[in-house]
Image: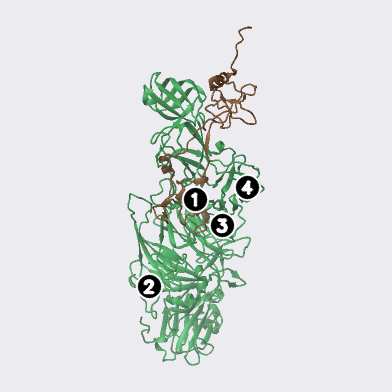
């Protein structure tokens, strides 16, 4: 559904050069792109949400106990540790996962990185809106606003001429 | 021990009565006395003194016949309902209601064999225990619990924890300034500056009220009652009534956390009730003016092609075998007969269902569930905290599609911290792990002990005592609740509870005593571990044949060792070998069949027995019941010394060989053994054979069809061992039974006297004289069979004159009594008179 945008012209930015040519765009809090193709103002609105996908803990190996119990053991032991790549897989009856503990050239494994430790260390999960697109280094004229565009247009000597004779 | 019998003089007539010392195949036959039996089958005696024939009755004839035996039986009773006998045969499970003439009900395991067609996974023997009106069962391949009438509702033994953390989708929150607010009769009404949509909607969604200036009693997190999407909202809050106030503040659906909030969830079976251990936790989410939708799904999506399910981005695991699959468009994968179950997992992206679902699914979100699950509990932490408190609970309905209708989705708009709403004081039950599958279960002081676990043969696991605060303690086994015994190359092979203690055996020669209470062994960095139980090795070098080869009796625990001895232990004095009289029978058991031995304590009116079912004579199945009379054992002295000289005194054993009557003969078979306390109050000793449940001590009034018992009888040990230097030439024998002598012939009684002279006639080949009522008794030979006519006091069908037609003599005389085979009566042999001299006394 097309939406009408009220916007500050001073916030119109010039996009990077490309097959579609430079086109002005406007950064919004929802990271939308405004299409300036002459059609009524439209936006492709995303949900504005971020997603923490489900992460698994899996039991590997074929040691003692039935598979269901091995899985329960793995969930018990690894349920509160971080899962790089979204899955923590380890042998619940073997050598457990963990970070190297202590020094030397053959340190034993300590414990894995706990989720709470991760959070307390400043690495919780959070939604961070992506940074706005900056001017491409290939752009012939890196400009950040239409005002700047006008100034450079004038400074290049091709400013607006006022025909006072008319 | 002394072995020579004392001598005493012979009398002109001798009365042999109280022939109740039972079978003795151990003592030298030249040292025994006629109270002991050289041979016996299907007769017993007791402190009452006479010898009685067994009565057998068929209680259940399994139909259609399977040709397979009942491998294990278990008595089970429910208050207000009935008492039942659980059994397993041919890969199927059954219950028999003793209050309804043993009406049969098949029990269906929904995870393994929902259709009840039979599978080897359900083969016995099953080990079963009861707690809180629930039967817990394991057979080394499957574990399950049963509840309700006939224990017909079979569920899992515990609930497996979810194995994936929740999916959390955050969205921007919203907020509106308060225009005015009022509390009246516990309901708060607010008018906002603008409409506020509350995720989850009225009745479910949370709102946060933040008052900065004014009456702060309105602050907090609440469930919105009405008005989502409007500018007028209501919710419930206890408190004093107020006027319409205009504080400065907001109503919002924002969550803002400094460190972050983490979530986990668990399954619940409200029918027990029980709660599983929690799922893996999510990362800590650092909310910044946001709210969240929490979805309980596995990673990836699934599609099906018939019964084969393919995943995209999934992590299928074989731990899911037996569970069911739910997808967001189809709901639970079902056939016409119910939930389909996962029967195999080929890879992280492929598994197979037990059938083709009625509704196909393509690239759908999914979850795997236990059909016993009825609810879902959601837990979350405070900001940067480590404790997971329950905040929400949904009913779980796998029959519907969609995350919201099924209960697999929660919303979180609440910004509060514990202990404020919606945080409860309930924490996630991290230690509610189901036990591993083992072969045997034992109950010790309200705790279930599991052993016989593949890969952990020297260990036992025990259920929680205090580590479970929500859920069934007996279905929850904290991972460190285990004990490993120092038994070298042995395996834990038996456990028996005594008053205040338990004895544990290995399959070799280890015996331990466990005392105290098994306490939970939890990892703690602050509290030193305190073990409530002590396990001490006993110095007796005795193991056990198998976990079913023991039972507790009033005289102590009785069990069969791997080297085929029967011992008694009182937990106060040293064990005693009480199986010597039947050691010759025990020694015929093949070592490969030690696992078949069963022991059961039975008492009813004048029976006080310990029954041992064994595969005698190298048989591949149990065919003999060795029955120890505990009343006679107790009468032999105080329990501190059950010592016997074995010549004059020994434990009294009876030998039963029950089984079906086929072509006029009993085919002995007794694979399983159980004592049943029927709903009407009768106590019965039942054996399980091939397609047959049989009462082996039938009293004539209980349910069942009595069968004939041919071939029952006993042969006494020799009379005259103490004076074997003299040849005895008796003049008469009189056999007294509980029957009228005139009925002896029609009943079918017969007798035999065996003469042994140690020269020509030996124990192996004695001189035999058959004495048949109605044929060669004094009445028949006197022309007056069955006392139909003639003068009394001179002859009797139970009196046999020796000399002339009947002849027997010897240094030692043994007597054989052959009981009638008929039904409906108790046949008892009371005493034997042996006379000497020219004529019998008048």
Chain drawn in brown: A
The residue under label 4 is B310
For image coordinates 45% across by 76% down, the residue present is B583
**Is residue B381 left or right of B166 when viewed as pictured?**
left
Percent across and percent down for residue B603 are 43, 64
Q: Quadrant of residue B422?
A: top left
Report the residue marked by disc 1: B81
On screen, residue B642 versus residue B782, left or right, reads left
Q: Residue at x 61, y 22 (%)?
A: A41
The answer to whether the residue labelled 1 contacts the one labelled 4, judged by CB atoms less than 8 Å apart, is no
Question: What is the C-alpha distance between the residues marked 1 and 4?
Answer: 46 Å
Considering only vertical position in the picture, is B233 above or below B587?
above
Discs 2, 1: same chain: yes
> Which mark is first along the chain, 2 or 3?
3
Task: Name the secondary structure under disc 3.
Answer: strand
- Which chain appears green? B
Indicate which label's residue lies in the foreground, 3 or 4: 4
Identify the disc placed on residue B93: 3
Which chain does tag 2 point to? B
Viewer can see residue B12: no
């Amino acid at each position: 559904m097309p939406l009408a945008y009220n916007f500050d012209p001073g916030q119109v930015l010039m996009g990077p050069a490309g097959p579609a040519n430079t086109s002005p765009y406007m950064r919004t809090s929802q990271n939308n792109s405004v299409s300036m193709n002459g059609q009524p103002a439209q936006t492709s609105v995303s949900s504005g949400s971020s997603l923490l996908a489900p992460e698994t803990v899996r039991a590997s190996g074929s040691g003692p106990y039935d598979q269901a119990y091995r899985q329960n053991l793995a969930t018990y032991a690894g349920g509160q540790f971080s899962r790089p790549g979204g899955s923590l897989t380890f042998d619940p009856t073997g050598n457990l996962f963990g970070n190297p503990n202590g020094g030397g050239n053959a340190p034993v494994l300590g414990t894995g990185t706990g989720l709470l430790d991760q959070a307390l260390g400043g690495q919780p999960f959070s939604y961070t809106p992506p940074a706005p697109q900056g001017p491409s280094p290939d752009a012939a004229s890196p400009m950040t606003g239409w005002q700047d565009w006008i100034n450079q247009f004038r400074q290049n000597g091709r400013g607006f001429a006022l025909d006072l004779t008319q | 021990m002394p072995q020579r019998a004392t001598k005493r003089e012979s009398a002109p007539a001798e009365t042999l009565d109280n022939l109740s010392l039972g079978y003795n195949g151990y003592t030298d036959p030249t040292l025994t006395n006629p109270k002991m039996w050289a041979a016996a089958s299907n007769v017993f005696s007791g402190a009452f003194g006479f010898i009685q024939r067994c009565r057998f009755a068929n209680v259940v004839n399994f139909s259609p016949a399977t040709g397979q035996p009942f491998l294990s039986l278990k008595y089970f009773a429910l208050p207000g309902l009935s008492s039942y006998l659980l059994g397993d045969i041919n890969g199927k499970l059954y219950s028999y209601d003793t209050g309804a003439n043993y009406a049969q009900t098949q029990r269906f395991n929904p995870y393994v064999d929902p259709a009840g067609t039979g599978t080897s996974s359900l083969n016995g023997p099953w080990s079963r225990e009861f707690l809180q009106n629930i039967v817990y069962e394991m057979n080394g391949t499957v574990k399950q619990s049963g509840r309700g009438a006939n224990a017909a509702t079979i569920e899992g033994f515990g609930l497996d924890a979810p194995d994936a953390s929740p999916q959390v989708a955050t969205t921007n929150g919203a907020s509106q300034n308060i225009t005015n607010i009022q509390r009246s009769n516990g309901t708060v009404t607010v008018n906002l500056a603008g409409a506020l949509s509350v995720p989850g909607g009225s009745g479910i969604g949370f709102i946060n009220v933040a008052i900065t200036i004014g009456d702060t009693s309105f602050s907090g997190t609440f469930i919105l009652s009405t008005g989502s999407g409007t500018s007028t909202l209501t919710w419930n809050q206890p408190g004093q009534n107020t006027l319409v106030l205009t504080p400065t503040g907001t109503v919002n659906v924002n969550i803002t956390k400094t460190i972050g909030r983490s979530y986990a969830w668990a399954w619940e079976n409200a029918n027990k009730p029980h709660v599983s251990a929690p799922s893996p936790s999510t990362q800590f989410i650092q909310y910044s003016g946001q709210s969240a939708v929490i979805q309980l799904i596995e990673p990836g999506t699934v599609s099906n092609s018939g019964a084969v399910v393919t995943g995209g981005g999934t992590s299928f695991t074989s731990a899911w075998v037996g569970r069911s699959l739910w997808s967001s468009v189809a709901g639970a994968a079902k056939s016409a007969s119910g939930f389909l179950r996962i029967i195999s997992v080929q890879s992280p992206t492929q598994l197979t269902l037990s059938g083709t679902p009625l509704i196909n699914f393509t690239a759908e979100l999914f979850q795997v569930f236990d059909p016993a699950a009825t609810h879902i509990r959601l837990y979350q932490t405070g900001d940067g905290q480590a404790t997971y408190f329950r905040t929400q609970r949904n009913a779980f309905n796998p029959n519907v599609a969609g995350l919201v209708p099924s209960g697999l989705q929660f919303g979180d708009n609440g910004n509060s911290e514990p202990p404020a709403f919606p945080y409860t004081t309930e924490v996630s039950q991290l230690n509610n792990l189901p036990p591993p599958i083992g072969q045997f279960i034992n109950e010790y002081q309200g705790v279930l002990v599991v052993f016989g676990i593949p890969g952990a043969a020297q260990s036992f696991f025990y259920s929680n005592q205090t580590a479970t605060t929500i859920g069934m303690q007996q279905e929850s086994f904290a991972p460190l609740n285990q004990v490993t015994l120092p038994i070298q190359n042995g395996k834990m092979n038996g456990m028996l509870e005594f008053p205040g203690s338990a004895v544990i055996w290995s399959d070799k020669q280890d015996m331990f005593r466990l005392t105290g209470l098994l306490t939970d062994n939890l990892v703690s960095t602050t509290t030193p571990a305190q073990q409530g139980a002590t396990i001490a090795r006993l110095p007796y070098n005795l193991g056990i044949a198998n976990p079913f080869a023991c039972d507790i009796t009033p005289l102590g625990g009785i069990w069969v060792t791997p080297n085929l001895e029967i011992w008694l232990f009182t937990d106060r004095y040293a064990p005693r070998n009480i199986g010597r009289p039947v050691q010759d029978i025990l020694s015929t058991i093949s070592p490969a069949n030690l696992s078949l031995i069963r022991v059961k304590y039975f008492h009813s009116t004048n029976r006080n027995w310990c029954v041992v079912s064994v595969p005698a004579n190298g048989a591949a199945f149990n065919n003999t019941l060795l029955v120890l009379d505990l009343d006679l054992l107790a009468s032999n002295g105080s329990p501190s010394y059950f010592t016997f000289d074995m010549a004059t005194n020994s434990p009294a054993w009876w030998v039963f060989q029950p089984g079906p009557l086929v072509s006029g003969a009993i085919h002995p078979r007794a694979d399983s053994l159980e004592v049943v306390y029927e709903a009407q109050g009768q106590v019965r000793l039942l054996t399980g054979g091939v397609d047959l449940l049989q009462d082996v001590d039938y009293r004539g009034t209980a349910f069942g069809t009595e069968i004939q018992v041919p071939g029952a009888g006993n042969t006494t040990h020799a009379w005259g061992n103490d004076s074997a230097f003299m040849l005895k030439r008796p003049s008469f024998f009189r056999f007294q039974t509980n029957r009228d002598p005139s009925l002896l012939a029609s009943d079918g009684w017969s007798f035999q006297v065996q003469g042994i002279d140690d020269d020509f006639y030996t124990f192996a080949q004695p001189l035999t004289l058959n004495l048949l009522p109605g044929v060669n008794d004094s009445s028949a030979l006197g022309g007056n069979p069955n006392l139909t006519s003639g003068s009394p006091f001179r002859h009797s069908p139970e009196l046999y004159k020796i000399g002339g037609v009947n002849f027997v003599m010897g240094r030692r005389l043994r007597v054989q009594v052959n009981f009638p085979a008929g039904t409906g009566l108790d046949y008892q042999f009371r005493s034997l008179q042996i006379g000497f001299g020219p004529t019998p006394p008048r």
